[in-house]
Amino acid sequence: MMNFKKYKRVPVLDYPNREWPDKEIKKAPAWCSVDLRDGNQALIDPMTVDEKIEMFQLLLKLGFKEIEIGFPAASQIEYDFLRKLVEENMIPDDVTVQVLTQCREHLIDRTFEAIEGIKNVIVHIYNSTSVLQRDVVFHMDKEAIKQIAIDGTNMVKERMKNCEGNITLEYSPESFTGTEMEFALDICNAVQKTWDHANDNKIIFNLPATVEMTTPNVYADQIEWMNKHFEDRDNIILSVHPHNDRGTGVAATELALLAGADRVEGTLFGNGERTGNVDILTLAYNMFSQGINPGLELGDINEIREVYERCCKMKVGMRHPYAGKLVFTAFSGSHQDAINKGIHAMNKRGDGIWEVPYLPIDPSDLGRQYEPIVRINSQSGKGGVAFVMDAAYGYKLPKEMQREFADVIQKISEKQGEVSPSTIMDKFREEYLDAEEPFAFIRAKVEEPEEEGETRVTLRFRYKGEEMLAEAEGNGPINAAIQAIRGKVPSVDVHVLNYSEHALSEGSEAKAAAYIQMEDAKSGRITFGVGVSSNITRASIRGMFSALNRLSR
Ligand SMILES: CC(=O)SCCNC(=O)CCNC(=O)[C@H](O)C(C)(C)COP(=O)(O)OP(=O)(O)OC[C@H]1O[C@@H](n2cnc3c(N)ncnc32)[C@H](O)[C@@H]1OP(=O)(O)O
Ligand SMILES: CC(C)C(=O)C(=O)O
Ligand SMILES: [Mg+2]
């Protein structure tokens, strides 16, 4: 048996007054991208200056107004990147860059050198506060740990006096989720008092789930408890910075927003230390799919993924929310059937509201309209095949025909696996449109009666290779054509069970498709035939030939 006894349960905050379970997310928070810092520090190959610039430009395009660009005191590359942004005037006036530093004098000095000339900067200082890190990393008691934060705050305050930029202080009690709440609060209050309204900007307290240690509700309790107990809440921006160790970073962030967080730090696709930071894209698309303006421009997920994969040398998984290659694809029959019906119902309703079973969001809102929603394999049913024929080629197969054609396709998928839309269309042509044996249509002249009376059809066709000319009257063009054929090929004894037609495309090149279901009177066999022509009467006669050929097999 696995040794689960070696792990301790994480203590749960005793907080019965929680209010967050009754709240709803109604607006997007302030977003801060930490791709260029937390994301970058977790890469096998951290980004080069050029890659950082490309990523920075993407983040601007997506509408981020706060971007942690790195840890400029940590390495030359981080420093040079920031200087390049400043010297080449790449930071828009409405964007605030954020820089991270430990609470150590030489690092804070170097950080202030790096930010010279920037209009708006968040200087982000942190130190670890958790029980474990106090014990095994810092060997310090609570007072000494608190003093690191106070010293760091004083250092920023001091250096700010000689800095022209508009500075906001951000403080993170790093490893917050492993810290006693009273102690985390005590440090934050001490930092705020030390800062003492050094300028008009609100202080940012960023409460990180540096390591996600337990269930999201516990994080929400911790955030709400802090939110309710700060001494000077009005002058605080409450920020969260969740990681995803247990795979619940998004859930923890959403609950933290219910609990009162104003701001979220995270990364694209959740890149970051270990299992990553929280995925801002998923959070934002989640809000979007609930009718909330996410405050970011996320209409081209393919471009975001492409830049991310190139700069970070990481791959987005096939089933990654919203972005994964397969997340808008249904293979299984009942899902395809429901999607097919849902899309038709929605188009018919025409109220502009997206409501389709199994598709919580319209893929085209993310720029993914060209990807097949429905892909066909042996798990697929008639609805899926009908969807592909309609979505990819414009053929609206009558409901009664869908089973017949799906059976043809399933035989292929059982042998070869997935069947592409083009193979489905090739098979449709082979089965219904192209067959010329034993009957091949050549041409038809249809004379409609002026008033009451019969329709006259003159038909030229081939039967078993022999060309024939036939004439007959009937109560409509199809009936007259059947009579005409029968006059030459007496074994033909069929009647029409079902008929439908529709336009295939619009404009002067428009064609029509006609579907005819026919029964062979002798054998009782039933099949569909399909005809396509620019003339609807000719389409229906071709459809009849198609059905005759299928009945002759
Ligand atoms: C959760 C997070 O993501 S935090 C951000 C982590 N990111 C990074 O660390 C990336 C960039 N960091 C670096 O390049 C390096 O760590 C540097 C340049 C910042 C510092 O380098 P060094 O001083 O050589 O090494 P290191 O980081 O190991 O320093 C550890 C020392 O700093 C102290 N320290 C660590 N964090 C802090 C802090 N936030 N504030 C003050 N002191 C700190 C430690 O107690 C330790 O002290 P000791 O030498 O007396 O034992
Ligand atoms: C620096 C801090 C905010 C951090 O990245 C973390 O705690 O995860
Ligand atoms: Mg982090």
Image (cartoon, grey):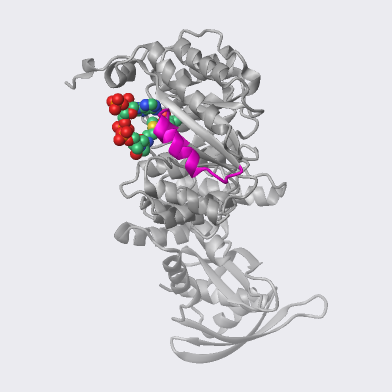
Camera-side residue of 99 and 37: 99
Residue 75: tell me if it is visible. yes
The residue range painted magenta reads 100-119
Q: Position of residue 526 (x, y in %)?
A: 49, 63
Which quadrant holds residue 174?
top left
Camera-side residue of 346 and 522: 346
Residue 273: tell me if it is visible. no
Q: Position of residue 544 (x, y in %)?
A: 56, 74
The residue lying at 44 percent from left, 27 percent from top is: 126
Q: Position of residue 519 (x, y in %)?
A: 52, 65
Residue 105 within the magenta-colored segment of the rendering: yes
The residue lying at 63 percent from left, 85 percent from top is: 444
Which quadrant holds residue 35?
top left
Camera-side residue of 228 and 151: 151
Residue 28 higher or lower than 205, as above or below: below
Q: State the quadrant of the N terminus.
A: top left
Q: Position of residue 295 (x, y in %)?
A: 63, 42
Camera-side residue of 105 and 367: 105
Residue 296 higher or lower than 477, as above or below: above
Residue 381 within the magenta-colored segment of the rendering: no
The residue lying at 48 percent from left, 16 percent from top is: 187
The residue lying at 41 percent from left, 35 percent from top is: 107
